[in-house]
Image (cartoon, helix red, strand yellow):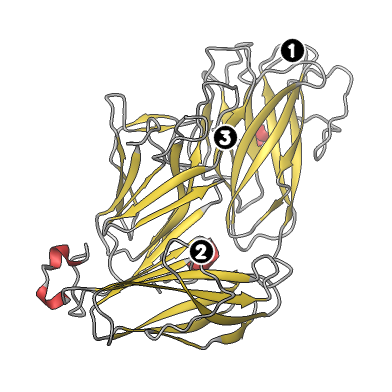
Amino acid sequence: MIASNLLRATTFAGVLACAFVPLAHADIALDGTSTPTTYARGRVNSFLLDLHVVSDAFAGVDALTFELPPGVTLSAVRKRNTFTFCSDVHPLVDGMGTGTGGWYQLGWPALDGCGSFAGSPDPGEEQIVIVDLDVPAAYSGDLPLTVHALGDGNGDPPNEADLVLTLADEGAPPQPVVATASKLALAVDGGVANVQVLAIGNTGAGTLAYTITTAASDGVTPPDCGVPITQPWLAVAPMSGTVAAGAHDDVALTFDTGTLAAGDYGAALCIASNDAAQPMRVIPLGLHVNATPCAAADRVFANGFEDDADGRCSQALRTFDDRDAFLATVAPGYETNAFTALRTGYVHGPLHFGNAYPYAVTAEPGYDIGDFYLFDGAGELSTVSPGDTSRLTITFTGTSVTAIGGNVWGQMFQNPTVIEMNMQPPTTIRIELDDGTVETFVATSQQDFRGFVSTRPIHAITFGAPLPGDDGEYVWGVFDNLVVGNAR
């Protein structure tokens, strides 16, 4: 990894923020912009950098690195559209999980006169890269991201340049924001009353005011919240309330199966609030009444989990599409992993992670060269190839786990028709828990999140992207920023 003092070497005076001012005798210069231009605290943020390497001597760049303020670290860097005239050059990624790192040409620091990233006279060769920054919750204020280009030595000095992109603090949303589960599934014996607590949080600013009604739901047709329907087997308390910023209300949902026959039942909670972006939040509720009492069933196959501590095979599973709402339901001591210790290349599995909550990751299908291919460096896990049989499975090997969540999306690592790589097209993602629960949704970016909180241990979870896109091409299913722990 390049030393910090080298990243602070002589820079190009006048190259500030997102602008480049041409100077005399300049053989390497760098300009560019970032999308977005703001960051959110307490999470991994993804930025698309549109960079231009400018050189009147057609010099290239042997190292393209990044430097961050103390406490902020690199989670991943990926190429998207990069131009080079060195077909045999493969950049290495280093420094993930630290505040300095990036791409280095094979053989660096020996300059061989053929840079990994090509430069040409103004306006320069476009280099689009994606950078993930892990910003702690305590960080605030402007966040300067320094991009450092070290030239290949072709032409006269100076052979390096800096670009500073200033990212603004997004801060708290200016209005209340509802944070809660996206769905709840419950399986119980007949003749019981089961109480589930649903947290309604406010991750915005100001006071959240909400009112709850119930509507019919068949699991297929979108519920009509304009037609409230009272379900005799469901009671909600309270049905309205207020929540201060950063706090949450616990709403008790009582499922009474005393008069219900075995089978499946559905309803929906309609949460109307002063959240301007989401004034009506609809939460599907699924209730399954067991045909065979748990005490009389084979515990291995009753519900997929070998746990009968309560003498019944009841299970509740909450699904979340919001990371903040998910974390509010997870007990302290959970572990997170951005997979920054991984490096580019083919890898055989299983890969082992976790300390308090150990787990192994396997990939299908496997090949002689490896089970995983870690494209363009650390920061995410994917299979060697895409397709309808490609999948990643996490199996927990130690402490009981009842809460798991992370970012799941589709990524086009290699596109056979265009130069652009690492694109994130809309992708159908399939997630399956080891009890047979399946969650399917369309992911549109690497910020898409899914989390699960269960009343029974989760032993394994599988991710995949089994359907081709509109162009008939399969997309890699990817997961990252994994959270593992137990329900609060």
Q: Residue at x 38, y 51 (%)?
A: 431
Residue 159 in view: yes
Q: Residue at x 47, y 31 (%)?
A: 375
User: Pointers 1 and 3 in contact (CB under 8 A)?
Assistant: no
Name the residue carrying label 1. 58
Mark 3 or 2, closer to the camera: 2
**Which of these two is toward me, 448 or 217?**
217
Residue 43 vertical placement versus 314 (above, below): above
- Count residues near mark 2 (Cα–Cα under 10 Å), then give few for <14, some for 14-19, many for 20+: few
The number of numbered badges drawn on the structure is 3
**Which of these two is toward me, 75 or 176?**
176
Q: Quarter holding the C terminus? A: bottom left
Name the residue carrying label 2. 222
Percent coordinates x, y for residue 372 in the rendering: 36, 34
Q: Residue flagged by tag 2: what amino acid is it?
A: Pro
Name the residue carrying label 3. 423
Percent coordinates x, y for residue 305 in the rendering: 22, 64
Q: Residue flagged by tag 1: what amino acid is it?
A: Phe
Mark 2 or 1, closer to the camera: 2
Choose the circle earlier in sequence order: 2 or 1: 1
Mark 1 or 3, closer to the camera: 3
Q: Residue at x 69, y 73 (%)?
A: 205
Percent coordinates x, y for residue 32 in the rendering: 76, 33
Secondary structure beneath dot 1 equals loop
Q: Residue flagged by tag 3: what amino acid is it?
A: Met
Percent coordinates x, y for residue 8 in the rendering: 70, 36
